[in-house]
Amino acid sequence: MPIISLIVPSEAEGERIDKYLTSSLDGLSRSYIQKQIADNRLYVNEKPVKSSYKVCTDDNVSFDIPASQVPDIEPENIPIDIVYEDSDVCIVNKPQGMVVHPAPGHLQGTLVNALLYHLDGRLSGINGVLRPGIVHRIDKDTSGLLIICKNDIAHASIAEQLKDHSCRREYHAIVNGIIDEDVLTVDAPIGRALNDRLKMAVVPNGKPAITHLEVIERFNKYTYVKLKLETGRTHQIRVHMKHIGHPVMGDPLYNPIKPSIKLNGQVLHAKTIGFKSPTDGEFKLFDSELPDYFIKALDHARNS
């Protein structure tokens, strides 16, 4: 049984233990954590606590996760758009609204379930049983291209390219307001928001994060932009756009202004991806069409 140990940082002082663990342990739902607490699998300073316990700075949290709680992920015949495939990788165009990988309590309907079916289980295992083949990801309500690795050698190769920034990733987005500059670079560190552990924010002690922006088209109330990621922090584009005063249109977390059209999330699409092929060493570049929801939002922005 894996045991996770955490020391509570000062910025989490006063949070409920179940909320703190949900934001700190990627992939575990709050209901799952509450069940483990009820089963006395969680200790603070070597004593069991209830879900309502409020953590203190430097609390020692020990969390015993039973292996039996991580079931096999079932392949599902869910249609997916595979735009390229070879012996090492495949490129998938993920639709808006699809979760990338399962988590305890949410084990069906994800991209991984679909990949297990369509690729007959031929996926890398470095990221564990819940994330086979997943070397990077995009948010549920962000659409676009993802690299899926079919073996561990390919996974290590793509992971290294992501780490040294040689993997090319370009996004298109519609953001609130008019950006005056034609090009700009946002260089601002990102970490957990101090007042809301479920959000990310630009914080002084965050991890380095760099986003390059280029304006494609300006409207009365919005700007259509292309964004290149130099780093890949959680919610990086969404946080950086909020930071400069131009949050992504329809973003439920970082944009308080609701658009006058119905959207199911942020208007953000991973349009282009490029990398050095683990198979033959050649640089491969893939581009995707804008999805229908994005085109609808563009029409709205032009007529706003």
Image (tube, helix red, strand yellow):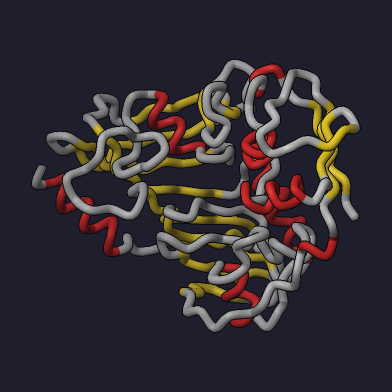
Figure quadrant of residue 237 = top left
Frontmost residue, 178 versus 176: 176
Quadrant where the image shows the C terminus? top left
Q: Please indicate whether residue 252 sits to the left or right of residue 65 in the image.
A: left
Quadrant where the image shows the N terminus? bottom right
Residue 182, horizontal then vertical, whole percent: 29, 30
Residue 78, horizontal then vertical, whole percent: 51, 79
The residue lying at 25 percent from left, 40 percent from top is: 258
The residue lying at 70 percent from left, 43 percent from top is: 25
The correct choice, above or below, for 103 with respect to 190 in the image is below
User: Is residue 228 in view?
Assistant: yes
Figure quadrant of residue 11 = top right
Q: Please indicate whether residue 229 sits to the left or right of residue 135 in the image.
A: left
Q: Please indicate whether residue 209 sits to the left or right of residue 141 in the image.
A: right
User: Is residue 280 in view?
Assistant: no
The correct choice, above or below, for 9 with respect to 16 in the image is above
In the image as oriented, which residue stretches furthest toward the left?
Answer: 303
The correct choice, above or below, for 15 with respect to 42 in the image is above
Q: Please indicate whether residue 303 sits to the left or right of residue 89 in the image.
A: left
The correct choice, above or below, for 268 with respect to 202 in the image is below
The residue lying at 56 percent from left, 60 percent from top is: 100
Residue 234, horizontal then vertical, whole percent: 57, 40
The residue lying at 55 percent from left, 26 percent from top is: 193
Residue 24, horizontal then vertical, whole percent: 68, 37
